[in-house]
Amino acid sequence: MKPTTPDKIRNVALISHGGAGKTTLAEAMLFDAGAIGRMGSVDAGTSTLDWDPDEHKRQQTINLAIASLEHDGVRITLVDTPGYADYQADVVQALAAADAAIVVVDASAGVEVGTEEVWRLAEERKMPRFVFVNKMDRENASYDATLDALKAAFGPKIAPVYLPIGSADSFRGYIDVIEEHANVYEGGSHTEVPIPPEMEGIEHTRRDALVEAAAEASDELMMKYLEGEAITDEEIGSAMHKGTREGTVVPVFVGSALKNIGVRELLDMIVKHIPSPAEVGTRPTADGKELAPDPSTPFVAHVFKTTADPFVGRLTYFRVISGKLRSQGHVYNAGRREEERIGNLLAVHGKDQSSLPEVGPGDIAAVAKLTSTQAGDTLVADRAQAAQLPPLRFPAPSLQVAIEPESKADLDKLGQALSRLQEEEPSVRVHREDGTGETILTAMGDAHVDVIVDRLKRKFGASVKTATPQVPYRETIRKPAKIDNKFKRQTGGHGQYGHVVIEFEPAESGGGFEFGNRIVGGVVPKQYIPAVEKGLREAMAEGVLAGFPVVDFRATLVDGSYHTVDSSEMAFKVAASQALKRAFTDANPTLLEPILEVEVVVPDEYMGDVMGQITSKRGHVLGMDSSNGMQLLRAQVPQAEMFHYATELRSITQGRGRFSWKLDHYAEVPHNVADRVIAERSKTTAAEKH
């Protein structure tokens, strides 16, 4: 990667639904530009950008990957992304690095759910876009149907620039609507030919549509268009460039990445119409200031991804916003307020890396072995002027699984492995559930979990098993009880004696545990009262109904007695512990379950099915809001019913629904459910004892 100026850089993310052919398109671009000697294959595991063993195993992109090429004196950096929804965090990271996106669409499948999702992410960033209609050589490929679907989904800004000549086996080239000629491919090379007579009418119609779309970006062109004046190719190109940059025009190109048709021309259009970092101009900081892509200003870079490699260590990917940075220097992490030492700056080309002497505005590069920097952080040269860029917003994971090591050796490695995994997986959460003792992994979906399990073993040497988590139930009491409990034991020498009278009463939900003391006259000496509280707290860890933690009650020590010789802190701890267990018999004990507050976002047509499913899960709908053809449903649902909801929602909405959740409160479990839970818990406990 040669040093260059911001106006000679194009940073482009390739985004799509899974299987549309992004990685093959990137491979063809790299080949056409001479960046690689031959075209690799995704299916054969030889592509430049799908190099990870997990990607070879699944024959799909799982991680974003970067490679650069040079075309017409311009450096184009491609950021390839996964198409499957479980790996959407990498799409967010790629869009943070790029200045524009190419949305790849399968001509035989049209606009799919993943197309809508990545379009939404690009729209949120107001990012310029191209559409590349790929796989025109496929059976059932239909350009017209795909174009109609694009316009229906994304509006009149969709502007066809190329029209295919033929489809499926007969696909052999395209018509350039702007320059009004055709390119036909034979034997790997193309020839410019006149537009086939049978397509002249279609070409004129599409040209009019393109002119109309481009005119939206130029008042002068709009006036000429409305007055019926002739419009030159240069005027159309200029308006299309302006409209692309502003997001009012989305040019549509066509081809076959596998057969390398239309790819070189796409590179031409990237150079002509994708904005450079210089043209994009300033970027806002978190506090509203603007950073210009100027090499003479202080260095600022946005970290968009980190990976944890067992051999190289942590690799940090960043995009330079302003200023320059040389290798073997120091930077300051503005958010974490820590200095980082910079070793060799690296240009990334798939799995390969090469050293860079320096980086400047618009450059995408990497550095190894930063100690604390993570995705979303801002690196600056000047601590005194520590600008901070807005953080990255990643999709919240929603599928929970319990994980446990397969062996003692795996247990020793698991803690560090999970810590390093979370450095490179921003959409993964790991926590230990107090009520069950399980380690809970929260990921984006089943496929994401499978990849994480493989990665833990391959990269970090920790093999784990997964299971559906246990529900972290709680136990409590529903009415007051007064317990007089005496613990007395004689063992030959000093005995044990502790006597307590404790009043137990329910507390409001979420009230936790309160301990009170109304002892008068020293019937229980002061030095033993903390032992009473400690005994109660220890006994709370395991309730009587099913062994779950006890919550939401008050215990007040009101009376008792002691023995001058045999009493001890231990005796009063045991007496208090026994008192709590006895209280459950008299205080109407009950089982509590966690209730989640759930927000589900789905297209209008799926709302009925989603509401029915929520109701079938003992859910209670709180309300609904509507916006842009999408419905937001808010509900409260028992956690016990939600462990597989990520997969279920994806199924009933054809992948178009998404949801988030958070713990809201604990509520009493219905009798029939409680009886089943208690019976299952008893069986499990009995089996563990044997």
Image (tube, rainbow, N blue to C red):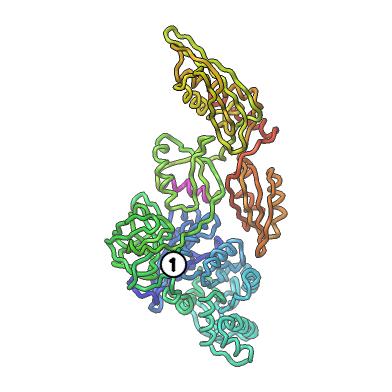
The residue furthest left is 328
Q: Position of residue 67 (x, y in %)?
A: 41, 66
Q: In the image as oriented, which residue stretches furthest toward the top?
A: 492
Where disc 1 sits, the SS reads: loop
Work out whether residue 36 can be spotted.
no
Residue at 54% in and 43% down: 401
Residue, disc 1: 39
- Residue 208 placement, left or right of 9: right
Residue furthest to the front: 521
Q: Callout 1: 10 Å neighbours few (<14), some, many (20+)? A: some
Q: Quadrant of residue 350?
A: bottom left
584 to 453, vertically: above or below: above
Image quadrant in which the C terminus is located: top right
Q: Is residue 336 above or below residue 22?
A: above
Position of residue 586 measured from the top left corner of the image (x, y, whole percent): 65, 23
Residue type, label 1: Met
- Taking the image as drawn, is residue 99 in sight? yes
Q: Is residue 563 above or below residue 573?
A: above
Of 505 and 64, which appears nearest the observer? 505
Magenta stretch: dominant secondary structure: helix
Tell me which segment is drawn in magenta. Answer: 447-458
Residue 177: name its quadrant: bottom right
User: Residue at the location (51% across, 29% down)?
Assistant: 537
Question: x, y percentage for residue 605?
Answer: 71, 59
**516 or 414, which lies in front?**
516
| Labels in figure, total | 1
Quadrant for the N terminus in the image: bottom left
Q: Is residue 638 magenta?
A: no
The one of 540 and 111 positioned closer to us in this rendering: 540
Residue 324, percent from left and from top: 32, 69
Q: Nearer the viewer, residue 366 or 190?
A: 366
